[in-house]
Image (cartoon, helix red, strand yellow):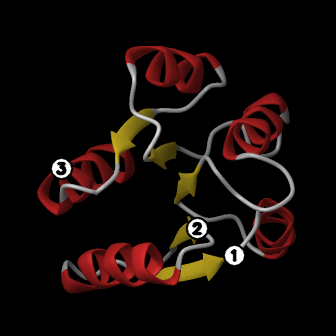
Amino acid sequence: MGYTLIVDDSATERSIITGCLQEVGINVSVALSGEEALEKIQQKFPDLIVLDIVLPGRSGFEICRELKGSAQTSQIPIILCSTKSTEMDKFWGMKQGADAYIPKPIDQNELIRKVKELIA
């Protein structure tokens, strides 16, 4: 059984997303920064990544672009989550290769639906 990697520097958001996914039986691992996420991904590829955009160090946009640009990790679905939820932010997120974009505060039903859709 694989796992979903949640990358978010907000403890509150992490616990909401983690709880929401664990409730439907999804294994979860967390990273607090893009750098930590990249380290975890090298150890074991997740089935899916839920990625915040505003992170310490490198942004979620950069991490997304790097993962989608590498042959090893380009197949991993990425859901970008952010308080930045204008059409321009969504457009830019999808341009970086994201598979979905969910605005914060997160609609938990929408998150679960998207996750199941992407790892089906």
**Residue 117 is drawn in which quadrant?**
top left
At x 40% / y 23%, what residue is drawn? 86
Q: Is residue 28 above or below residue 82?
A: below
- Secondary structure at badge 1 equals loop
Q: Position of residue 29 (x, y in %)?
A: 57, 82
Kindly identify the amino acid type of the residue bearing the numbered disc 2: Asp
Q: How many marks?
A: 3
- On the question of residue 18 being in view, the answer is yes
Among numbered discs 2 and 3, the one appearing first in the sequence: 2
Single out the mark in the foreground, 2 or 3: 2
Q: In the displayed structure, does residue 5 sit left or right of residue 87? A: right
Provide the residue designation for mark 2: 8
Q: Residue furthest left?
A: 109
Kindly identify the amino acid type of the residue bearing the numbered disc 1: Leu
**Residue 36 is drawn in which quadrant?**
bottom right
Q: Is residue 89 above or below residue 71?
A: above
Among numbered discs 2 and 1, the one appearing first in the sequence: 2
Q: Is residue 111 above or below residue 24?
A: above
Among numbered discs 1 and 3, the one appearing first in the sequence: 1
Q: Position of residue 77 (x, y in %)?
A: 52, 44
At x 70% / y 58%, what residue is drawn? 55
Do tag 2 and tag 1 residues touch (Cβ < 8 Å)?
Answer: yes
Kindly identify the amino acid type of the residue bearing the numbered disc 3: Glu
Q: In the displayed structure, does residue 72 sit left or right of residue 101? A: right
Provide the residue designation for mark 3: 110
CA separation in Å, label 2 and label 1: 5 Å
Q: Which sits in the foreground, 115 or 51?
A: 51
At x 25% / y 76%, what residue is drawn? 20
At x 74% / y 73%, what residue is drawn? 44
Provide the residue designation for mark 1: 32
